[in-house]
Image (cartoon, rainbow, N blue to C red):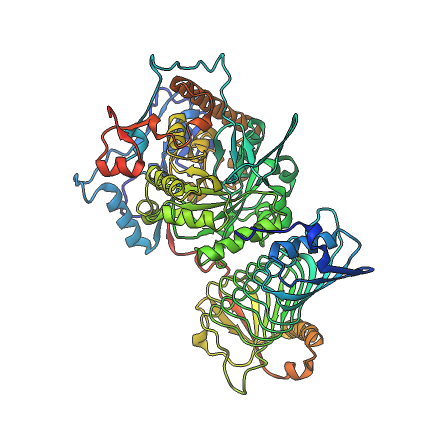
Amino acid sequence: MYSHLLPEFAVERIEDRCIHCRVCERQCATDVHYYDAELDKMFFHEEACVGCQRCAVFCPTNALFIRPHPAEYRPNSSWNREKLQDLKKQAETGGVILTGSGNDKPYRIYWDHLVLNASQVTNPSIDPLREPMELKTFLGRKPDNLEIDLNKEEVKIKSELCSNVSITTPIVFSAMSYGAISYQAFKSLAMAAKKFGTLFNTGEGGLPLNMRKDYGRNAIVQCASGRFGVDLEYLNAACAIEIKIGQGAKPGIGGHLPGEKVSENIAVTRMIPHGTDALSPAPQHDIYSIEDLSMLIYALKEATNYEKPVSVKIAAVHNVAAIASGIVRAGADIVAIDGLRGGTGAAPKAIRDNVGIPLELALAAVDKRLREEGIRNKCSILAAGGIRCSADVMKAIALGADAVYIGTAALVAMGCTLCQKCYTGKCTWGICTQDPYLSKRLNPEITGQRLINLLSGWSHEIKEMLGGMGINAIESLRGNREHLRGVGLAEWELDVLGVKGAGE
Amino acid sequence: MFLDGVRPVSELIKHVSTNGTHAYIDALELKHKELNDLLREMAQKEVTSITVQNVFGQRYIGTRLYFPGLAKKMEIKISPNPGNDLGAFLNGHRLIVYGNAQDGVGNTMDSGEIIIHGRAGDIAAMSMRGGKIFIRDNVGYRAAIHMKEYTGKVPVLVIGGTAQDFFGEYMAGGRVILLGLNLRKNERHKAHYIGTGMHGGVIYLRGCVEEYQLGKEVGIRALDSQDREIVGQYVNEFSSHFGFNPAEILQEKFQKLLPVSARPYGKIYAY
């Protein structure tokens, strides 16, 4: 415990309502609540509270209120409370300040400055409840041209087609590794992806052997700098392979899964000894250039007999358009771009909050660049990092994405409240933990259904919005900036996004 | 971009001649995919050993020989110079190179054996997790980087010559033996930053190395009897491949490099 810190959260208990059932005590993973039998009363250590709201939600009499702690230093817009508290933590430990989930700082959220179009009078809108509406999306390289053999009645495609993966909605669960999240959370994502006909991404923690047969066809498996759990069986079990170069929450740095989280099952899945640190180096040491990236892309294609698309995931950084162009030319079938707001299980706060650029600008710049160079067809674009709702999905697709990755949104659907303490391994919601007492709080059947519900709801909303535009297939929206207008954006921002201002 | 103009196997089969379970491939002017298509084609027949000649930089030899449920392991003799990622992800096969290999030998190799009668480029045995690699001469930068082991799977890398910088960087498991056979008397090994970030596994080093050449996560120890047994076993194997006298090699002093902590970066964070 730190000696000079104010508590982050205040716990308020309405004594009249409290029935001393001790649910709060059992639900809390940081030992905030405790019961004194002699006094027959509940007490709390509020300095341990992380504000996850688990106790408040589970309190049967609504006796608990958890709020940001009202104690304040003298107001100061430069030296704010967070800066002061971090300074004090570092003064005590000399360490790097860790955090979890995505960037929470008030950078402009461009989704909230973009509005969508709808049909009025001059072309009819479509009602998706009564007319077919196509959300099916194919991820992978498309041919430069299509040669067709017309032989009387028979039509044959002469051009050689690259392998593509078909998904029923343009929403894919982004990379969250088994190890970062619990087995139950990992399996929930897999089950939901399979039932809904979309994909989940294993992250770099491997794919448990017992899941390969049932869920491999819906898995994007990652090959990252640690190469954990990567062998030919793993690569061939998947429907696509992703080379992880970077992550929006922590561009340019690697990852450390601390030894205490490497349980027996995680050790087997990652193929490392039980209890050792799993260190992912910052770069992949066989990739120091676009040519080297190409070498790994083709190594993975060789390893899977050219049967699976290969994705390359990068963090959105300053020269993202040029980098993406290099990635496509290196042979990638999918480019995944993870923006400034992308989440993480653990990252240094200095990096999470300050490195990278917003997804919206990066995505628009990449799409524009690839089209200008005439190579947009050679890859699909997956947009990740801060997609919060179906409208964000629509806007991302109109800015050029083929589909989006959702991570944080899926976690919230499973129970996450964005307390940002993922790195402590004490997730009371059973998501970001390896403690069996906590992780068994998730039942993959139930949590998987919550994820399916999320996908269903968003997909329906997307159909409604498409119908409103008078469009009956998601393909017609892709890169279609005519359906977007900017509100409250400067000229340069409109220019990068490639959209007109509202009213234009 | 490597696939333009790739010819189908039916057009390439003239590069192959077979004799029972042995096949001979002339790799002259074959693209890497074409050569690997042929190797895959042969592996699916009764062929168990293949000699590939006129190999000039073709990549990924051995990578595509994965057939779920098929236990057959091939022996492939390659000369003179295979390209990058020789035996990447290798799954139990045996590759023998009569010449020099390039970068990425045994990249993320799973099992099998690679024997190189020559030198190898950078990142040899990167992320290797099983099997054995024997290299007669020198290796480039970052050899054995992030090698790892688990349960009974312990990768082995034996290098006859010396290595460049960042040798054994980030090593998480496995056994690496650096013999320095081509160094002069009292000449030290070339590498700096040996074992930087190392947190598992062991490096046995024959010949001289100064403290300042080591990464700060590494400590030097003397060999115990078990170490000598391990080193003896692999030096014998190495010698039998390349015609050295193992007793002569083992006469010199060996040192053992070990990580000082299994968690070198455990204390850098404020929670």
- Can you say whether B253 is above or below A30 in the image? below
Work out whether residue A468 or residue A482 is closer to the camera in this orientation and state it.
A482
Q: What residue do we see at 29% from left, 39% from top?
A: A496
Q: Residue A489: x, y in percent?
A: 23, 33
Side (left or right) of A432 relative to B114: left
Q: Would residue A284 be seen by someone viewing this image from the given angle?
A: no
| Quarter of the view holding residue A79 | top left
Picture quarter with the C terminus of chain A: top left
Q: Residue B216: x, y in percent?
A: 43, 68
Name, please, the residue furthest toward the right.
B20
- Can you say whether A347 is above or below B61 in the image? above
Q: Would residue A431 be seen by someone viewing this image from the given angle?
A: yes
Side (left or right) of A185 relative to A345: right
- Can you say whether B254 is above or below B157 in the image? below
Side (left or right) of A194 relative to A93: right
Work out whether residue B96 or residue B260 is closer to the camera in this orientation and state it.
B96
| Quarter of the view holding residue A83 | top left
Work out whether residue A475 or residue B190 is closer to the camera in this orientation and state it.
A475
Q: Residue A46: x, y in percent?
A: 34, 36
Work out whether residue A241 or residue A432 is closer to the camera in this orientation and state it.
A241
